[in-house]
Image (cartoon, rainbow, N blue to C red):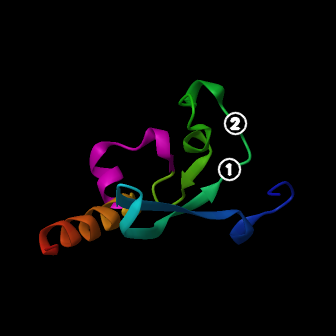
Amino acid sequence: LMRGRIGPDRRVAWTEALAVARHGEVLAEWEASGTDGVLTEDYDPRLAIPGFWVYSLWLFPELGKRYVELGPEELAQLDLTWTRLKVEVQRWWHGRP
């Protein structure tokens, strides 16, 4: 689907979903998106993390780095999806009856 696409057509964003259930009943659910980047065309198998191939292709142009090359501080700044989910889950956990 991405072959032949260039520029803004190669922009990607990560989306995650999370649910809490008890005995088959969903108690709460959330979805968060963010962490925008560009999907590169070149693949370097030395950068691949088994099971997470997309991290080696996901480039953050503003930093000139791929996801797998980011340090802890950069990840905390850019990985908005899980940060947003954490806030929502904690809010729900502390406000539940």
Decide whether the magenta segment is chiefly helix, strand or loop. helix
Q: Position of residue 36 (x, y in %)?
A: 52, 65
Q: What is the secondary structure assignment of the residue under circle 2?
A: loop
Instruction: Please give the name of the residue rendered at 12% of the width and 69% of the height, measured from the top-left corner.
Output: 94
Instruction: Identify the residue under disc 2.
Output: 43
Instruction: Please give left or right for residue 44 compared with residue 71 in the image.
Output: right
Name the quarter where the C terminus is drawn: bottom left
Q: Report the front residue among 53 and 93.
A: 93
- Outermost residue toward the front in this view: 23
Distance in Å between CA atoms under marks 2 and 1: 8 Å
Query: Up-down: is 41 above or below 17?
Result: above
Q: Position of residue 38 (x, y in %)?
A: 62, 59
Residue 61 is labelled as: none
Instruction: Identify the residue under disc 1.
Output: 40
Q: Report the front residue among 93 and 39.
A: 93
Q: Position of residue 50 (x, y in %)?
A: 56, 28
- The kind of residue tagged 1 is Thr
Query: Up-down: is 45 above or below 11?
Result: above
Q: Position of residue 64 (x, y in %)?
A: 51, 51
Q: Is 9 included in the stretch rendered in magenta?
A: no
Dividing the picture into quadrants, the one containing residue 4 is bottom right
Q: Report the front residue among 30 and 8.
A: 30
- The kind of residue tagged 2 is Tyr
Instruction: Please give the name of the residue rendered at 65% of the width and 27% of the height, measured from the top-left corner.
Output: 45
User: Which stretch is magenta?
Assistant: 65-78
Q: Are marks 2 and 1 in contact (CB under 8 Å)?
A: yes
Name the quarter where the N terminus is drawn: bottom right
Binning the other alpha carbons within 10 Å of mark 1 as few (below 14), some (14 to 19) or many (20 upward) gives some
Q: What is the secondary structure assignment of the residue under circle 1?
A: loop
